């Protein structure tokens, strides 16, 4: 939280969910206290440094929103202490900041921030290719495990007889494949003597 310029306005807490699944709703909260005779002038929300939502109680309507990529506001579920983002996407991933300002004469302000990461889980489990029906002693086992599309990229590992293979001599790391819309497929190869 940024230091307060006045004791008349105090930022209590800014709550931004750390992770949300693509398509879910995210509620960002900005909890503050006005002390004494202070009155709220405005609450502003920023994605990175771009304003996307403003609440001004003196205005009718009191909610103002601005077009920002990755932001879809549910105005029915938003007010001075929260903004509700519907159907989040990978483009919703960002740092978010809330800034609260009191009216004159103090014009006191306070702010706080948090980061939201939107996650896309693979729709299918990993797929293994390269296996043969039969191996002879001395043959090389050459397999590739490939994840489904996801974000962030899936982390793969090989287990042989319930033991993780960690030797770089047996692992083949393939470059990730980045698909349109930012999803990533990862692959990890395994080479062992039969």
Image (tube, helix red, strand yellow):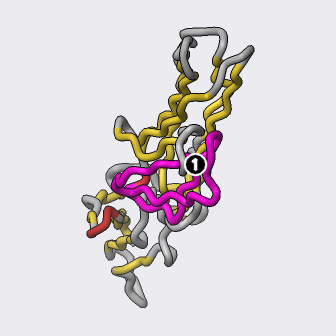
Judging depth in this view, the residue of 77 and 40 nearest the camera is 40
Q: Position of residue 52 (x, y in %)?
A: 42, 46
Residue at the right extreme? 36
Vertical order, 1 against 188 (above or below): above
Indicate whether 59 appears above or below 172: above
Figure quadrant of the N terminus: top right
As for residue 72 lying within the magenta part, the answer is yes
User: Mark 1, residues whose alpha carbon is within 10 Å: few (<14), some, or many (≥20)?
Assistant: many
Q: Nearer the viewer, residue 48 or 157?
A: 48
> What residue lies at 35% left-to-right and 65% top-to-bottom?
183
Q: Residue 146: where, in percent of width, then height?
A: 38, 71
Q: Position of residue 136 (x, y in %)?
A: 38, 82
Would you say residue 108 is visible in this rendering?
Answer: yes
What is the magenta range? 62-91
Going 35% across and 54% down the picture, which residue do you hit? 67
| Foreground of the two, 159 or 137 | 159
Left-right relation of 182 to 97? left
Q: Splitting the image into 4 quarters, where does residue 24 fall?
A: bottom right
């Amino acid at each position: 939280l940024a230091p307060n310029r006045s004791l008349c306005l105090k930022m209590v807490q800014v709550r931004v969910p750390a992770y949300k699944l693509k398509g879910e709703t995210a509620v960002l909260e900005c909890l503050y206290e006005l002390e004494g005779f202070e009155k709220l002038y405005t609450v502003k929300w920023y994605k990175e440094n771009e304003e996307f939502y403003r609440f001004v109680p003196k205005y009718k309507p009191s909610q103002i929103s601005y077009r920002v990529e990755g932001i879809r506001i549910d105005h029915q579920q938003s007010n001075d202490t929260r903004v509700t983002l519907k159907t989040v996407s990978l483009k919703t991933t960002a740092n978010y900041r809330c800034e609260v300002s009191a009216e004159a004469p103090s014009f006191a302000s306070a702010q706080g921030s948090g980061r939201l990461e939107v996650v896309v889980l693979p729709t299918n489990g990993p797929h293994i290719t390269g296996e043969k029906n039969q191996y002879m002693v001395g043959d090389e086992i050459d397999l590739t495990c490939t994840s489904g599309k996801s974000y962030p990229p899936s982390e793969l590992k090989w287990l042989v007889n319930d033991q993780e293979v960690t030797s770089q001599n047996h692992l083949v790391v393939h470059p990730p494949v980045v698909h349109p819309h930012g999803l990533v497929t990862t692959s990890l190869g395994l080479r062992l003597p039969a």
